[in-house]
Image (cartoon, rainbow, N blue to C red):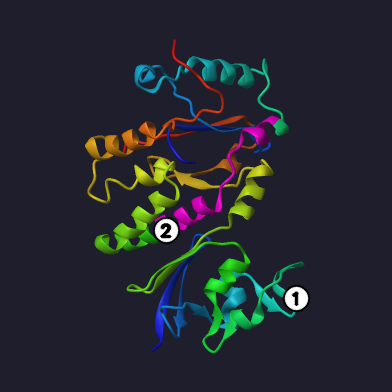
Amino acid sequence: MINVPTILWFDEEGRIARPNDVAFGSNDFKEMTGIDSELHLERLRAWVRGEGPAMTPEEARAAQTLPTAAEQEARAEFTLAWWLSQRGHAEDAEPHYVRAGELAPHDFTIRRGTMLIRGLDPMGEDFMKIVNEWTEAGNAFYRPIEPVSAS
Amino acid sequence: MSATLTLLHDGRTDEITVADPARPTIPADALEATLGWELQPEGLCQGAMCVPVDQDALVGDGGLDLGVFADALQRPLVTDEKHVVAALGASHHDRGEALASLQAPDFTLPDLDGNPHSLSDQRGKKVLLVAYASW
């Protein structure tokens, strides 16, 4: 999981029927995100009612983004930083948070999720700065399995 | 000078006496209880599975070198020397294999009243998991 919202579907046996995807429950943020919630909701309703398929295992595997060594190292850096933060060592935690972000710049669960504890604003300028840097470099902030454009 | 290393790994926290905080080690006799691996002539073993390892590099005077252990298993090891704490992460290979199996790992989280709920409690039903944040 690298950002929110993230949704997953699990079938009756606890298997992943649709891997990590980006979907919203409403169109409240459609103008900002460019993601129309209806496509996911229609699919979800059809799957729950037994009127439509989830994904085949092959499709689900093809849609997964498996973790890299750098992402796993970023998570270890985050674990270490969080442990230090929780014990009042904010200054010593900071370089580990920064390193985690360098290792996995696309992982906003780490980069945005740690802002509050680092004295940064996850809803304001600090957040917009990292998002703008990321998107101006040609990267998408939300990465749904299939492109979903707002009309 | 020996010190106590706090090792964060696999959702656990262990405290280990180390000879040199700059080069974390683990006593050979604590390897299995702490990390679930045994050192055998074949390498690092867990049940029937063994991973080759350079035993000369792994085994030193202070015990087993955690950096060599982590490298052999493709697990990230990050350290903070000042506070003598290390985090040993999961290997991307193992995580990738687990995810590609499509079998969801079980987990338990509390609801707003503190009551725990596990994914496995929902067997027999289709489940939509939504992760969101208010930041």
Q: Are marks 1 and 2 in contact (CB under 8 Å)?
A: no
* Residue range highlighted in magenta: A59-78
Mark 1 chain: B
Q: Amino acid at mark 1?
A: Glu
Q: Amino acid at mark 2?
A: Glu
Mark 2 chain: A
The 10 Å Cα crowd at callout 1, few under 14, some 14 to 19, many 20 or more, is few
Q: CA distance from mark 1 to mark 2?
A: 31 Å
One can see residue A148 in this view:
yes
At a point 42% along the width and 35% down the height, the residue shown is A4
At a point 43% along the width and 43% down the height, the residue shown is A107
- State the mark number for residue A77: 2
In the image, taking residue B87 as reference, residue B105 lies left or right, namely right
Q: Nearer the viewer, residue B48 or A129?
A: A129
Q: Is residue A28 above or below residue A93?
A: above
- State the mark number for residue B85: none
Q: Position of residue A15 (x, y in %)?
A: 66, 38
Please tell me in which quadrant of the rendered image residue B126 appears: top right
| Residue linked to disc 1 | B42
Q: Residue furthest top?
A: A151
Q: Is residue A67 above or below residue A36?
A: below
At a point 63% along the width and 44% down the height, the residue shown is B99
Quadrant position of the C terminus of chain B in the picture? top left
Q: Is residue A29 above or below residue A65?
A: above
Q: Nearer the viewer, residue B46 or B92?
A: B92
Assign the magenta stretch its main secondary structure: helix
Q: Position of residue A50 (x, y in %)?
A: 67, 18
Q: How many marks?
A: 2
